[in-house]
Image: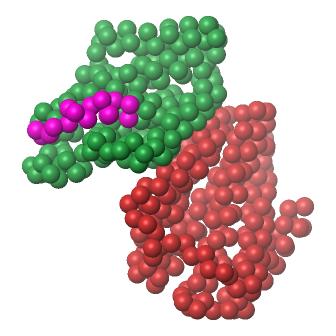
Chain colours: A green, B red
Amino acid sequence: MAPFLRVTWAVFRKDLTVERRAKEGINGLAFFALLLLFLFYFTLGPDGERLRAALPGLFWLTFVLAGLLGLGRTFALERENACIDGLVLAPGDKGAIYLGKLLAVSLVMLAMEAVFVAATGFFYNLDIWAAVPRLVPVGLAGTVGFAAVGTLFAAMTAQLRARELLLPVLLLPLAVPVLIAAVRLTEVALAGGSAESSAGWWRLLLGFDVVFLTAGLLTFEFVLEP
Amino acid sequence: MARRILGPAAGILLAAGLTAGLGWAPRDGVQGDVQRIMYVHVPAILAAYAAIALVFVGSVGYLGTRRETWDRAAAAGGELAVCFIGLTLLTGSIWGKPTWGTWWTWDARLTSTAILFVLYLSYQLLRSVVDDPERAATYAAVLGIVAALDVPIIHFSVVWWRTLHQAPTVLKPQAPSMDPAMLLALAVNVAGFLCAFAYLAVRRCRLLALEAAARHRALDA
């Protein structure tokens, strides 16, 4: 157990150190998310009610699109200077590398999501602050679920040609359940809805997280083969 | 074996089943002859699920043993999954036009089947993009496993997504007590489709094996 967590921690800390020094990920992702925010304004018009009705969907569309960029980047970094060879040759369980990468990319995505939610409230003058405590668990579970599948396929596609095209094409159909469940739960959280109406969605989302975290941990070694 | 038993069996069962379904079975009281498309539609989706299961089993087998036979089984399953899911969507759409008045609607079953179609298309894409055969097999196996695990989750998420909005009324999958003749015709067709699936899978595996052998020979020469 301990060596596994040590490797996880090392990969996680390495990615966060790179992130802290370069700040490429969070800056790029948050900037991209803000651009989308402006695009939503242009395409959906200034009507606040219309935006408010579409808000859960817009949130998760943004998180998924920006998340795709973040996922692509996390292994593009490893390709440069052939760092990925170091990961391939590293001793120990490859699942630990998967978990470290997953945690790092989830953290960057969550930071981007926080910026985006705050900016949405600010620019569209929406009173979403009261819903923030209810949004946090949804964001966590949805992001981890998306990143659980995403990390696996980002590692795979990073080693292929046509990787920019392939990652969304492989990932988006698989992530449909996360998207549906997270949007519904966000809807409930924004409306201050009841717990019992969302219990089924919670089970689905957490079930997805558990199934694909396990699948990722078990199959990552095949993706990282030399 | 495949050619001698599965092929003729599929041919006979399909001929009998389709003749029975399109001619002998009684006409549906409500939908008329349109309902007869069920004799293709339902067997097609069952064959598609068999193909998805084959992809999963082949993928697990390949990652476990590294034998190319398993990978060829998964590859054949992936192609047949796309074919049979496509056939299901096509026949469903043809049935939907006269029954619902539209080629397409975002019904739960339609939507989840469409996602499956896209999912297994992306499986084909992954296979075609990777040049190194061994790496293609490994990556495809990982996707084959993950996709199969996702199939039930996609199904439930889409069903809940639709039913939380509106109770199925018109689009409700009808479960009337079926005429025994209809049931028999359907059963024969299901058997025929499954035999056809098995036959095609075996033949495709054989062809893939021959292709691999030809490639090796070309490399040796």
Residue B91 or A53: which is nearer the viewer?
Answer: A53
Q: Is residue A221 magenta?
A: no
> At 46% from the left edge and 43% from the top edge, which residue is drawn?
A199
Q: Image quarter for residue B42?
A: bottom right
Residue located at (64% from left, 16% from top): A93
Residue A135 magenta-highlighted: yes
Between A156 and B162, the one nearer to me in the picture: B162
Q: Does residue B220 show up? A: no
- Left or right for B92, reference B9: left
Residue B19 location in percent, x, y? 73, 87
The span shown in magenta is A124-138
Q: Quadrant of residue A66?
A: top left
Q: Residue at x 14, y 39 (%)?
A: A126
Q: Which sits in the foreground, A143 or A16?
A: A143
Identify whether B15 is placed above or below B2: below
Q: Which secondary structure dominates the residues rendered in magenta?
A: helix
Q: Position of residue B51 (x, y in %)?
A: 68, 56
Q: Is residue A115 above or below residue A1?
A: below
* Snapshot quadrant of residue B29: bottom right
The residue under the point 10% across, 38% down is: A125
